[in-house]
Image: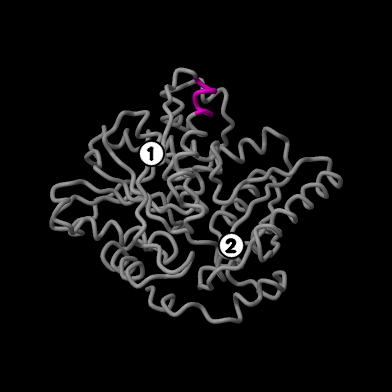
Amino acid sequence: MVKALPLFEAYPRLKERLPFVSFGIYPTPVEPLAGCSPLCRVYVKRDDLSGGEYGGNKIRKLEFVLGEARRQGAGEALTFGCDGSNHALATGIYAKKMGMRSISILRTQHNARYVRSNLLKSLYYGIQLYHCETLEEMETLAASLERQRLEETGRPVYRIPVGGSSPLGTVGFVNAAFELKEQIDAGLLPEPDRIYAAAGTLGTVAGLTLGLDILGMKTRVVAVRVNSETRINPQNYAGLMNATAALLHQADPGISIRAYAPEDTRIEEGYYGADYAMFTEEGVRAANFMRKTYGIALDGTYTGKTFAALLDAARAEENRGKALLFWNTLNSRKPPPEALQGDYHNLPKDFWPCFEQKVQPLDGQLL
């Protein structure tokens, strides 16, 4: 029998009123990173192991948003991202498990080996891929596809925002905070002073922040910005928390909520680099340190930059004696071997340059 989500155990009305489909393997492990710092106790939350076929932070969000897609009778899930989008790939994999087709509308990013890998996996899982150059083009295409599919099949297409970071998707990380509290109570780690997590679309950090607040914990979330300031800023962060809190309160009025202001958030700005998905030297060093020392793979776009922020904090005298937790949001599950053996020429032609142009120089320095 699958154990109920800790959030549902604490607030049973949510189980009755929120859509949910189980994909994850929970709780994800918490492990000490011994020797990481002479000053601090450092731990890692292994959300890279959150799913049997594909892990990472996307699973917790998709359990709710794809649950809503099923409730609406959708035949397809449509989502957005850049060429190497982990979220778009995860959406396609788990939509397929539900018997749904999936559509990914993607736009250009700085090239990397993982971009090629994710595109080949998308081909393997039968995801319908479309390429656009601008956000405006993506929106126009999405609306057109939604109308077309409804006319052809009589079933709606369920639209999922980039990263799955809707208020409903964010509930997945409110639950993650409750899961962490159970692990703290079981003695697997002390209550962290801070959690370091990548802020790419804000759903992970907003959900954790809200969940910790509901629980009355002292832990604070440090959102390490890995996307542009137009997306990752205090106003959007607080706005997503407020929308998610309102959704929870509506489903169960026993959940007390308060209004969040931008100053209630903490965004670490110093590790982003020159652009989204452009690797940094400190991020690559941090990723290589993690793999060499602990056998855990990180990437150059999200988790390497986030772990670099934690490492600097863990080695600062002002943090002596504190407990820090790194939330690993990257998938580490290996795909079937045949998933990477496809011919990229079977992809839409707009994606061929990802395989024909060079990857960024620092990509070659990732172990």
* Amino acid type, callout 2: Cys
Q: Is residue 4 left or right of residue 88?
A: left
Q: Which quarter of the rendered picture does the C terminus lie within?
A: bottom left
Q: Secondary structure at mark 2?
A: strand
Q: Residues within 10 Å of mark 2 (few under 14, many from 20)?
A: many
Q: Secondary structure at mark 1?
A: helix
Residue ID at (53%, 45%): 165
Location of residue 176 with respect to 47 vertically, above or below = above
Q: Are marks 1 and 2 in contact (CB under 8 Å)?
A: no
Q: Which mark is residue 250?
A: none
Name which quarter of the figure residue 362 lies in.
bottom left
Marks 1 and 2 sit apart, C-alpha to C-alpha, by: 26 Å
Mark carried by residue 82? 2
Residue nearest the viewer, comparing 179 with 324: 324
Of marks 1 and 2, which one's residue comes earlier in the chain? 2
Where residue 344 sits: x, y (%)?
66, 74
The amino acid pointed to by label 1 is: Thr
Name the disc covering residue 209, or none. 1
Residue at image location 40% in from the left, 35% down from the top = 210
Magenta part of the protein: which range?
246-252
